[in-house]
């Protein structure tokens, strides 16, 4: 059974239909890259998966559990909504780190709040809560080491480079152990010389058998890191398949044109 | 009568001014946030109501508002002011100042909140934070930092505005200075009062700049 199943997803902003009947599935540990020109709907699709936009139609299921169904009538409880939300993690194009907190606090804040809430509901003792917070701290340190920012734990985001910010943001998204980690053009806001370090970190995560969805304009990266590529055009999936299929033998005229364009660096 | 004798006589009034200042801040800062929420509410009638409130509070003189609050119970409900106890005068001043300043603070908060990028809300949301956690832990600290200079302006104005309380007869510093001046036939009491206001504001400015310095250990990119 696939880990993620999206079926018939659609979304419109007013009269403007941005997504039309999007269906695909993804297995555990797979990496999916969403490519396509600006305005093709790939970022909206990612935002729908992360509940930042409400789709107008369709269904999203993770691990056999429905996390979104446009036809559902009953309202979800806050706890259910939160659980669904945390099934996905999202790394933003512009990092969106919290500027008033250190890198460490950026990582631990949400995780600590969630742990405290959970333990308080279970009437845990103060010692247990303290131990849980210590575990969160430890986990944050591990993740910072993983993204190469051990020495930046107590630094504020304003004193980091763009690449370091994005690596911190990746570690923050990993703190809550999402089943599916999403990236929204993770290197588009970076200077060219800084994209390498971020792409290396993402590539290293792949070896951890994490399921990931990446919206990207880095075609070389998409080709090498992905198991599956979806090419979107005008709000629909124009073509989908393995990197070799899409990059080696593009079927549609649109994809051929898009690939030719990005090879000339116009899309980068 | 020399400078220091006048200073001693003004001392009592000075304390009254200080309490008007501190109590107004204490109540108007949180009330302003609530008014701001009302003003920014998606439910239109509520937002219109608070917009009207703010426009009245900013569009009419504070002195007039103090009169309305002070004499309101009598004109509206025929309650004799003497029945309201000896503290009513002071209480009316605090209520009037709080209602007025909260309206100004609300607009400053609103400017700060509107300027926040959607990205901060979205980041908190995908991390599973609740709406109140997002507002109080992520948004408000940044808003506060950004609006501190504007807030500081109002706070300094408030120090000077406390003298308006004399209009309904509160014996604060300015009222005392006025009495002393006519008694002594001298400008000196006004001069001394002016000095006290000035140094009071110097202390307020210093505190504000310290707060700004503390908050600027980080920058908002």
Image (cartoon, coloured by chain):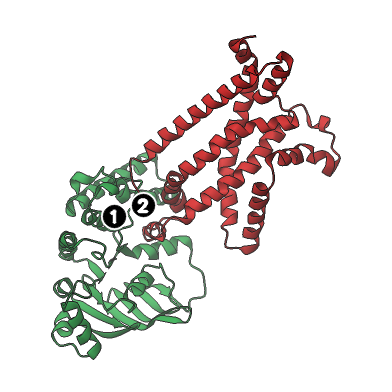
Q: Quadrant of the C terminus of chain A?
A: bottom left
Please give left or right for residue A157 compared with residue A264 in the image.
right
| A253, above or below B184, in the image | below
Residue A246 in the image: state x and y as whole percent.
Answer: 18, 84
In this view, the residue in front, A70 or A120, is A70
| B33, above or below A8, in the image | above
Q: Secondary structure at mark 2?
A: helix
What residue sits right under mark 1 in the picture? A172
Residue B210 in the image: state x and y as whole percent.
Answer: 41, 33
| Mark 1 crowdedness (10 Å alpha carbons): few <14, some 14-19, many ≥20 | many
| Mark 2 crowdedness (10 Å alpha carbons): few <14, some 14-19, many ≥20 | many
**The quarter of the displayed image where residue B77 is located:** top right
* Label annotation for residue B190: none
Whether residues under marks 2 and 1 lie with C-beta atoms below 8 angstroms apart, the answer is yes
Q: Which one of the lettered chains is coloured red?
A: B
Q: Which residue appears at 32% of the width and 79% of the height? A: A40
Chain ID, mark 1: A
What residue sits right under mark 2 in the picture? A110
**The quarter of the displayed image where residue A205 is located:** bottom left
């Amino acid at each position: 059974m696939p880990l993620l199943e999206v079926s018939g997803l659609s979304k419109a902003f007013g009269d403007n239909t941005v997504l039309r009947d999007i269906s695909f599935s993804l297995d555990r540990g797979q990496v999916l890259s969403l490519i396509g020109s600006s305005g093709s709907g790939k970022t909206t699709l990612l935002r729908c998966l992360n509940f930042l936009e409400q789709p107008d139609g369709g269904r999203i299921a993770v691990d056999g559990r429905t996390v979104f169904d446009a036809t559902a009538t009953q309202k979800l409880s806050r706890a259910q909504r939160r659980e669904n939300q945390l099934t996905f993690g999202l790394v933003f194009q512009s990092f969106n780190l919290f500027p008033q907190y250190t890198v460490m606090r950026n990582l631990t804040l949400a995780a600590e709040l969630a742990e405290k809430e959970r333990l308080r509901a279970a009437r845990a003792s103060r010692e247990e809560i303290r131990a849980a917070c210590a575990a969160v701290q430890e986990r944050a340190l591990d993740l910072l080491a993983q993204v190469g920012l051990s020495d930046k734990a107590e630094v504020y985001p304003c004193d980091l480079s763009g690449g370091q910010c994005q690596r911190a943001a990746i570690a923050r998204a990993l703190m809550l152990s999402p089943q599916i980690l999403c990236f929204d053009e993770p290197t588009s806001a970076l200077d060219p010389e800084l994209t390498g370090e971020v792409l290396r970190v993402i590539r290293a995560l792949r070896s951890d058998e994490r399921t990931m969805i990446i919206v990207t304009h880095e075609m070389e990266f998409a080709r090498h890191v992905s198991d599956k590529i979806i090419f979107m055009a005008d709000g629909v999936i124009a073509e989908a398949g393995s990197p070799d299929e899409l990059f080696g033998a593009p079927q549609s005229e649109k994809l051929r044109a898009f690939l030719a364009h990005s090879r000339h660096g116009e899309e980068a | 009568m020399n400078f220091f004798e006048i200073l001693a006589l003004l001392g009592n009034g000075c304390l009254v001014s200080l309490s008007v200042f501190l109590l107004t801040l204490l109540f108007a800062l949180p009330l302003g946030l609530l008014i701001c929420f009302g003003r920014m509410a998606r439910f239109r009638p509520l937002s219109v109501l608070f917009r009207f409130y703010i426009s009245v509070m900013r569009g009419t003189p504070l002195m007039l508002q103090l009169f309305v609050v002070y004499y309101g119970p009598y004109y509206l409900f025929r309650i004799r002011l003497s029945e309201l106890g000896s503290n009513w005068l002071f209480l009316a001043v605090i209520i009037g100042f709080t209602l007025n300043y909260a309206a100004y603070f609300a607009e400053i908060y609103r400017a700060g909140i509107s300027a926040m990028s959607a990205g901060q809300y979205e980041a908190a949301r995908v991390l599973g934070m609740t709406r109140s956690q997002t507002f109080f832990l992520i948004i408000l600290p940044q808003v506060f930092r950004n609006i501190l200079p504007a807030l500081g302006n109002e706070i300094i104005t408030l120090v000077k505005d406390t003298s308006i309380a004399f209009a309904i007869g509160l014996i604060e510093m300015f009222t005392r200075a006025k009495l002393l001046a006519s008694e002594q036939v001298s400008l000196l009491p006004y001069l001394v009062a002016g000095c006290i206001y000035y140094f009071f504001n110097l202390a307020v400015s210093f505190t504000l700049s310290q707060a700004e310095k503390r908050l600027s250990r980080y920058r908002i990119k």
